[in-house]
Amino acid sequence: MSAYPLQERIVVITGASSGIGRAIARKASEAGARVACCGRNREKLEATAATLSGEGHEIYLFDSSDMTGIEARVAEIAKNMGPISGLVHSAGASMVQLLRDTNFDRVSEMLRINYLAFLALAKGACRKGRYAASGMSVVGISSLAGVSPDPGLAAYAASKAALNASITALAKEYAPRGIRFNAICPSYVNTPMNGDMKAAIGEETFNGRVAKNMPLGMIEPEDVANAALFLLSDASKRITGVHLVMDSGGRGLQ
């Protein structure tokens, strides 16, 4: 039995196609939740669904860069599966880009996925009748970069800092309704996105700057999923507005 049970709860997870989102979907299902797996790739979502425990899980094609369709999709999930108890925005885009090389089209796309999509999701889920009578836990998968960014991450860090700031404000705004907002801010996580970053800055630089400064070891998707499970459960029912830093002992990698 899970230490953080989620029986008879509906949990919506974006970015469930792979990496952190897939790990959270598995953990939530093992804890007893029915999971709405959201992402852009049906084949990958089906692969995620095949790994889930229990029954009643559903797949929803979901483009986090499409603001106009997000609220309608959330409404559809609530209608089909029932009131939402947990919402995790794990879909995200990363970018290593020096100021002199700034591509504003790419920055705009990243901001839509990392930040604006979160606001659209929260707006859709916080409508009366779409969230559980007992309340709802909203978790944004942020990044240590939103707290302590490295060079080359100005735009990416800004998207995550915006997410963190909004979570602080929304936690205060929605606490009277029993809706909690929290962020998880991991350092570099062993995911395909992290592999892209390693390729961008070079393996030698990555190992010298990152790996050696993580004495507790590289963060795995399951580590972030465990934190998400805690924040989704009643074990954290008095916790809101928190930015949970996971730096594996790296003290912000400073």
Image: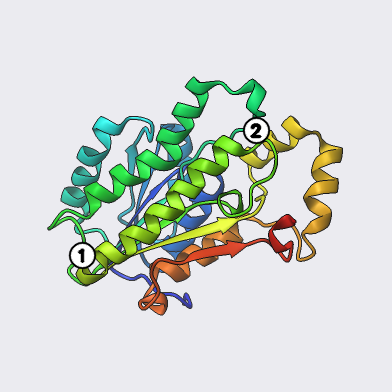
Amino acid type, callout 1: Ala
| Residue 126 in the image, given as x and y percentages of width and height | 22, 55
The relative height of residue 33 versus residue 146 in the rendered view (above or below) is: below
User: Residue pushed farthest left?
Assistant: 129
Q: Is residue 128 left or right of residue 122?
A: left
Q: Which mark is residue 96?
A: 2
Closer to the camera, 227 or 150? 150
| Residue 218 in the image, given as x and y percentages of width and height | 73, 56
Q: Determine whether the residue tagged by mark 1 lies in a helix, strand or loop.
A: loop
The relative height of residue 201 versus residue 188 in the rendered view (above or below) is: above
The relative height of residue 5 versus residue 157 in the rendered view (above or below) is: below
Say if residue 50 shows up in the picture: no
Q: Is residue 46 left or right of residue 173?
A: right
| Residue 124 in the image, given as x and y percentages of width and height | 22, 47
Residue plotted at (43% across, 60% down):
53
Q: Which mark is residue 132?
A: 1
Residue plotted at (52% across, 66% down):
227
Q: Quadrant of residue 76?
A: top left
| Residue 36 in the image, given as x and y percentages of width and height | 33, 50
Q: Quadrant of residue 138?
A: bottom left
Residue plotted at (49% across, 52% down):
141
Label 2 CA crowd tier, 10 Å (few <14, some 14–19, many 20+)? many
Say if residue 111 shows up in the picture: yes
Q: CA distance from mark 1 to mark 2?
A: 39 Å
Q: Which mark is residue 184?
A: none
Residue plotted at (53% across, 65% down):
244
Mark 1 against mark 2, which lies toward the viewer?
A: 2
Q: Quadrant of the C terminus?
A: bottom right
User: Residue pushed farthest front?
Assistant: 100
Amino acid type, callout 2: Val
